[in-house]
Amino acid sequence: MEITENEIKRLASLSRLQFNDDEMQKIAEDMSSIVSYVNELQKIDTTSIQDNTTIREFCELRDDEVKESLPNEAIIGNAPKKINGYFIAPTVVE
Amino acid sequence: MEILNETIENISGLLKNKEISSVELVNASLKRIDETQNLNILHEVCRESAVEKAKEVDELRAKGAELSPLAGVPVVIKDNISMVGTYTTCSSKFLENYKSPYNATVVDKLQNAGAIIVGKANMDEFAMGSSSETCAFGVVHNPRNPEYVPGGSSGGSASTVAGNQCFASLGTDTGGSIRQPSSFCGVVGLKPTYGLVSRYGVVAFASSLDQVGPITKSVKDSALMLDVISGYDANEFTSAKHEPENYYENSFKNSIKGLKIGFAKEFVELLKNQEVLNSFMNAIDFFKANGAEIVDIKLPHIKDALAVYYVLSSAEAASNLARFDGIKYGVPTDEFKDLVDFYVQSRTKGFGKEVKRRIMLGNFVLSSGYFDAYYNKAKAVQNLIINEFSDAFKNCDVIISPTTPSPAFKIGEKVSNPLEMYLNDIYTVPVNIATLPAISLPCGVASNGLPLGLQIIGNRFSESKLFNLGDYFEKNCFNLREV
Amino acid sequence: MEYDVVIGLEVHSELKTKSKVFCGCKNEFGGEPNSHCCPVCIGLPGALPIPNKEAVKMTIKAGLAVGSEINDIAIFERKNYFYPDLAKAYQISQAVRPICVGGGVEIETEQGQKKFIRLNRIHLEEDAGKLIHNSKIGATMVDYNRGGVPLIEIVSEPDMSSAEEAVAYLSKLRNILQYIEVSDCKMEQGSLRCDVNISLKPKGSNELGVRAEMKNLNSFRSVSRAIEYEIKRQSRLLDEGEEVVQETRRWDDARNRSFSMRRKEDAQDYRYFPDPDLLPFKIERSLVDEVKKSMPKLREEKIQIYVNEMGLSEYDAQVLTNDLNLVKYFDKVISYFNKPKFVCNFILSTLLKKVKENESTDLIIPIDAENFANLLSMYESGEISQAICRELFDEIWENEQDCKKLVEERGLRQNNNEDEIKVMIESLINEFPQSVADYKAGNAKALSFFVGQLMKRTQGKANAQIASKLIKEMLND
């Protein structure tokens, strides 16, 4: 199955990734061959499988108790940009 | 140092009898690590903390405390396992500076048992790969022959044990990432039953397939490690509530009489390498000659497991890796036009080619319009495979196969063709898809000098059967350490 | 051209659990930034979610209160999109198998008719963090304290056809959620939010028109105005033969109009799939039964009790039950002083006025229930006069004190002593002969004058009824 350049652009946008022209070509080729490979699954008869859902056998929901949070320094410790206990993100235009 | 060639079983005896101290062991380990730097096995060495911990253990032992067999033993963990005080990079540029503020459950368990973590092992970036060539900090070299890959994604974890830098390591296995490098490096690698070992604190690749497992020099050591790291974790909703078994105490029966070993011809139909085929058939003959019964089983959809794997694991990976945006952690870009571009530039810069490929593929199969045909279809075929294994296990105790279709290949040999790389996993992937346990142990040496591996697959929670058969084989048929 | 208006509402309500929905961090409004956080709710690599049982129970409660079916298997799914307030770049929500399905709410239309608004579903999900723009640094600050707080999303069918109906529905929903104590429902604080989907179609036509969505309206007024505006905007477009674009619009309350948000948002492919960290789990019938048993009474039941068992009027019961906090207060007061009608009358005539003066949407009564009960009890028994009661009430509203003590210390007891009163009346009659004459001439106001004077002389402590009676008697002599 051939993955077109437009499709690559759409997927790149969803993935928040960018490819230059050379990379574009390579990834389109790679994806086309991988998708063709996984396409083989279409030929398999799965009518005997009624419901895909695997229900969890053992299931412990958590009691509603407050546990100690991590201190602020630990939470924002790895942030490349921070100020006054907040993370900093590029400006969001509403 | 010859002491580094020992198994945990032997070394813990020496430690117990105070014939050697943990500090000596750690120092020997650190020395060996320094000597083998060219193999690029470890990303980080925990020099100070390891020596300090070794001193503590020695002191405890001097006071006469009863310690676990792992106490004072140097071990290594894969660099996608969170450990306070270290970087957890997943061998990615994106996480070059990331220091986790919390421990993975398995790290807590190792530390509580007194094990000494001496380093974080290099891997394929974000655990996606079969050769450890996608490590952002340089390829990892196979200790048996540095021109060859150690396998992946736990290439560093397998190499550190095979290279005698330490006595055991933890790797992670999503489609074979413990077993395949173990086979390539000639060591023992176990992928436990899904849910048996906690995933909490292990950077997620494919959440429904990932498992942490031990890589060791012997099967008995593998059982010792599993005793320490397994167990229900309330921090993980997919953790199994399985009654703790004493694997080391209870698995080894020294006999395989009457054991039913399943043989699926679908496995050998895919095999092209004669050496692999021969060593595998030798193993079968050995088992037969020693009282086991070889049972024919059918696994007709085993050949489709790889496709299922790539659909499901990529889908989960695409979602799991979306959190890497450069705001909360990571190495983001400084040059960007707006918010969306910030994400794009940071991620494009921070992720390697293979990771990007998988994310793209994952988003493809999750896209509305394709979801039903790919994701749901893969889930249905997964159920087919699970049922087939389940049926097979009605007639046998374990199933065997080669671990990999060929021995280790040279560095650079397969990087250009992703699909060809993926085919390394054809024997290991079905096991993850079916949530089963499997162990790989050395069963021969190829003409290129690189080891060959035998895979033993069991039903859920049947690790003790794997240990028994594996140990019997190791003791009576083939032990690479004695070759 | 005449159009039918088709409106559906998506209401998000924060649940008032103690901890967040997938981790044990505190679920509390405010606090220092990023001080209620952990690896799970800020999406550190390797962290894993564990569902909060109470959040699941509250979702079931909400479903039971509106007559939904509770699914026997619940599936959490990932809604994938990038935004700085979403730590994991996916929101754990529900799609194909929500906890509650169907149900509905009855409202009264402007014409006074009853209308049943059907629900599509109620599902459980997690809230995102907060973004705060910082113009000094030209960037946005992110606080994940709110990230991971449990939300229920209540999706209605498009059964509403006017702004009034939408507000009536929202108001009823809010009342129910408050009554079953799953949410504070404070719209201004954001614990209750509303998205509106609205489209127009030619009157009588069966084909639905293209709809616009407006998000995060946070007051009844905004909801109402946004709908009115949209009806006008879409009508105008359709009248001119133009098409309504399917899009998300932002409502600007200050400018009283809606704006189109960038189209990119509408092209979102959320790629929902079941969260592999949270396998589908069974909702045991025993859990549902447990929740059923602990269901508090809804407003209608409360009204029944007040009317049938306590003899309150239908109207009074309606007013009393408008806010659960008032109901709770009332119930507590009558537990100390069991005269429901009396208490109700005082509350409706006097207390609610005070509450309205405060101008807050949330009901705050600063007087302890027992203290208030004592005050009313003293008034009802005649121990203090109505005037004194009112005075004390005003005083302790501003500055609470034990009213029994006050009465004691200040000697505020009502004077019921007829002899003493007669003496005072005597002196008054002597002092104001003109008023006596006025009374005798038939001027009834003169009576009030004497009563007023007597109350003044006694600092309001004279028993007004006795005073009135005696004054009449004595004047008639």
Image: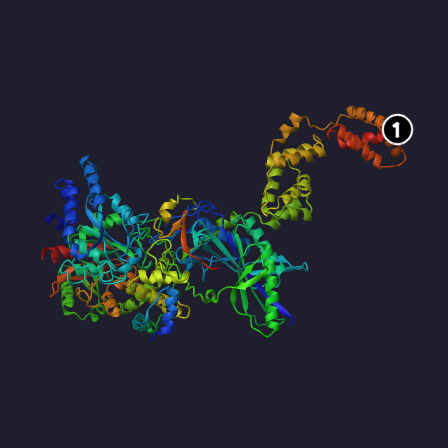
Residue type at the position of mark 1 = Asp
Classify mark 1: residues with Cα within 10 Å, few (<14), some (14-19) or many (20+). few
- Name the residue that disc number 1 marks: C477
The answer to whether one can see residue B479 in this image is no
Residue B480 or B118: which is nearer the viewer? B118
Residue B346 or B393: which is nearer the viewer? B346
Quarter of image, res B307: bottom left
Up-down: is C455 above or below B242?
above
Where is residue B90? Give x, y as percent.
28, 56
SS at badge 1 = loop
Q: What residue is at 11 percent from the left and 63 percent from the top?
A: B449
Up-down: is B37 above or below A35?
above
Residue placed furthest toward the right: C441
Q: What residue is at 35 percent from the left and 46 percent from the top?
A: A74
Where is residue C4? Give x, y as percent.
62, 68
Residue placed furthest toward the front: C136
Where is residue B446? Give x, y as percent.
12, 65
Left or right: residue C447 compared with residue B470? right
The answer to whether one can see residue C191 in this image is yes
Quarter of image, res A56: bottom left
Where is residue B93? Give x, y as percent.
29, 58
